[in-house]
Amino acid sequence: MLPAPPAADAGLLDETDLDLVAALQVAPRAPVNALAEAVDSSPSTIARRLARLRGDGLLRVVGRLDWPLITTENPRLLWIRCAPGRSQEVAERIAELEEVQTLLITTGSADIYCTVYPLLGSDIFDLLTRRLPGLPGIVSTQSMLVLRTQSMGQSWRLHRLPPDREAALAGYGDQVRQAPPAGLHELNAAELRTLELLAGDGRISAAEVARELQVSRSAAYRMTQSLLESGAVWPRVEIEPAALGYPLNALMALTVRPHAIPDVLARLAGHPSARYVAMVAGSSSVIHYGVFRDEQDLARFTTDDLGASADITALDTCVALRVVRRYWMARDGARLGERLPGFPGRLLRA
């Protein structure tokens, strides 16, 4: 059963914590010394704060696997309507599906929103046409195929640090220098295990990989760097925006004049609220998933930013009542739960 709706999460992070999160968003694998310099603190203090944030379930650095490695086609976005009083029950059942990456209970034209990824070994046709619509309590479903993704969750940042400190950290950021593998078949057993370790802990060191795999540190370093530099895995900071002062999640389905879609995508992706922006095939053409400080912040975005574009001809907004899962991790207010059991190991060992 899903946990009870949490109370408001306020005051969980102080100013130094927020600076540390902002630094990690720029460079998730930056060493503690570099993080300490960026936030004007000592390495020992930063190490303690990192340990506390992890231990309290407020922050985790994971690895996003290159989608073509673990999926067979583009994801779908689903809006689900439930029978009165059954949204919680339906969400609990949907949370059992490993293909569901993000799951929200919402208010508006839909009761539940979720993103579905066609993972290796899954039957997306059966999921969308039988398994999911057949769940008790579901009245109707509407799905949209993602055609182009303009912005994803790891792109959303606090931007608290001075430009010179962000620039210094950028050298520790993602440095993709080669093409990713065409498929998991190109990786040997040790590389697959390293990929799994990086997916679970985006800050794992070569020394830790070496101990886990019982290989030399130099071999572990080569495998780790190869996977990172090929873009097979991207380190990303997982922290609920609610912990950072952005508790309001809004999903906006926009109808946009076809010729203006590229421009609208680019402008929305550059907005501070943007966590996920995509072009989709369905009743709408663009989806904007944004996080906001409060209702007034959302109202200003709707009237001032979206309203300024004559190319946006219709808007449907759903606001999250609860974030149940994000990036395959359960959420309890601002705190992170465990990742879905078996993910991503099952995919890599299949």
Image: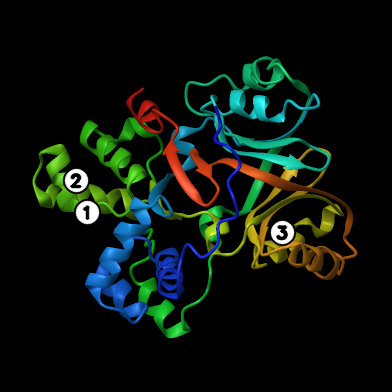
Snapshot quadrant of residue 15: bottom left
User: So how many labels did they put on this image?
Assistant: 3
Percent across and percent down for residue 120 are: 47, 26
Q: Which amino acid, mark 2?
A: Val
Q: Residue at x 11, y 52 (%)?
A: 218
Q: Is residue 224 above or below residue 165?
A: above
Q: Are marks 2 and 1 in contact (CB under 8 Å)?
A: yes
> How far is mark 2 from mark 3, CA to CA?
39 Å
Q: Which residue is mark 3?
A: 265
Which of 175/276 is in front?
Answer: 276
Percent across and percent down for residue 63 are: 39, 48
Q: Which circle's residue, 1 or 3, is located before the other in the chain?
A: 1
Q: Secondary structure at mark 2?
A: helix
Q: Which residue is mark 1?
A: 205
- Count residues near mark 1 (Cα–Cα under 10 Å), then give few for <14, some for 14-19, many for 20+: some
Q: Residue at x 66, y 21 (%)?
A: 132
- Count residues near mark 3 (Cα–Cα under 10 Å), then give few for <14, some for 14-19, many for 20+: many
Q: Which residue is mark 2?
A: 209
Q: Nearer the viewer, mark 2 or mark 3?
A: 2
Q: Is residue 290 above or below residue 40?
A: above
Q: Is residue 132 above or below residue 241?
A: above
Q: Which circle's residue, 2 or 3, is located before the other in the chain?
A: 2
- Count residues near mark 2 (Cα–Cα under 10 Å), then give few for <14, some for 14-19, many for 20+: many
> How far is mark 1 from mark 3, CA to CA?
37 Å
Q: Which amino acid, mark 3?
A: Leu
Instruction: Name the side, left or right, on which 269 lies relative to 317.
Output: left
